[in-house]
Amino acid sequence: MTSPTSRRTVLAAGLAGTATALTGSPAAAQPDAPAPAQANLSFPSTRLTREARHLVSRTQETYLRNHSLRSFLFARAAAEQAGQQPGQDYDVELTFLICALHDMGLTASASSNQRFEVAGADFAAQFLEQRGVTDSRVDTVWDAIALHTSPTYQASPVFRRRRAPEIGIAIDGIGIDVVGINAIGGPDTLPPGYVDRVHAVYPRLGGARTLTDAIVRHAMSDPRKAPPMTFPGEVLHQRRPDLPYQTWDMILDAAGWGD
């Protein structure tokens, strides 16, 4: 996968932090290229993206919906700053779907006993399959959402070469919205003034702190949603050190091999 922006930093908050206008067929077609990033606060308008936006507006609290939409705007703007053009270098519809749906695992609509990243990835895959998309785009969306709290995968040149570019573009946008542009690539990652324009339309409303609170609530509802040594498990441990916490040595002790 060719990444459009720097992968230099692990997204400390852990969140740092499918191609086509379908008109009844899953055949791929790109929406029109957007206006320059300095002015562009639009979203791709295809059947899938419109349905995804409606779903997000209906099921996500305002702070979470704003995070999802900002993530896409930052992803596209950062890609353009890096010379990556929608419709030429990556699929803008897929990128939007990843960003819009990446935290659906924190909503009641995608409730399961899995960590929120996997629950959200499963939900997004089903969203696409139910709408006639069954090709590799489903895999791209699933991979991006499931991995969005493990961005160091992108430091691997093999990962970048063999995975779809939309994964890196979307994860960068999500990361920018959680840990900021300095952690992702520096002040030149986005056009001057663009962050303020985005925040004026989609305010943070507590931003990453509120998002972290939601992750903790999700993890508290079922221990299986926060396994040890996963992002939600670590966040839960840091926020609630009073709760039981299974260490790696405890896991080895339970193996019964006497190692």
Image (cartoon, grey):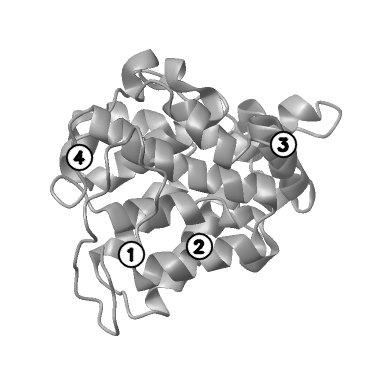
Q: Residue furthest right?
A: 242
Amino acid residing under circle 1: Val
Q: CA distance from mark 2 to mark 1?
A: 18 Å
Q: Nearer the viewer, mark 4 or mark 3?
A: 3
Residue that carries the numbered disc 3 in the rendered image: 210
Residue that carries the numbered disc 4 in the rendered image: 1
The residue at the point 42 percent across, 80 percent down is 130
Amino acid residing under circle 3: Thr
Relative image position of residue 228 (x, y in whole percent): 63, 37
Q: CA distance from mark 1 to mark 3?
A: 29 Å
Q: How many marks?
A: 4
Q: Is residue 157 above or below residue 35?
A: above
Say which label, 1 or 3, has the lower sequence index: 1
Q: Nearer the viewer, mark 3 or mark 2?
A: 2
Amino acid residing under circle 4: Met
As helix, strand or loop, the secondary structure at mark 1 comes to helix
Q: Look at the numbered discs 3 and 2 and tell me whether their residues touch, using CB distance below 8 Å.
A: no
Relative image position of residue 58 (x, y in whole percent): 64, 66
> Is residue 92 visible in this depiction of the protein?
yes
Residue that carries the numbered disc 1 in the rendered image: 138
Residue that carries the numbered disc 2 in the rendered image: 53
Relative image position of residue 47 (x, y in whole percent): 37, 73
Relative image position of residue 168 (x, y in whole percent): 31, 38
Label ID, residue 232: none
As helix, strand or loop, the secondary structure at mark 4 comes to loop
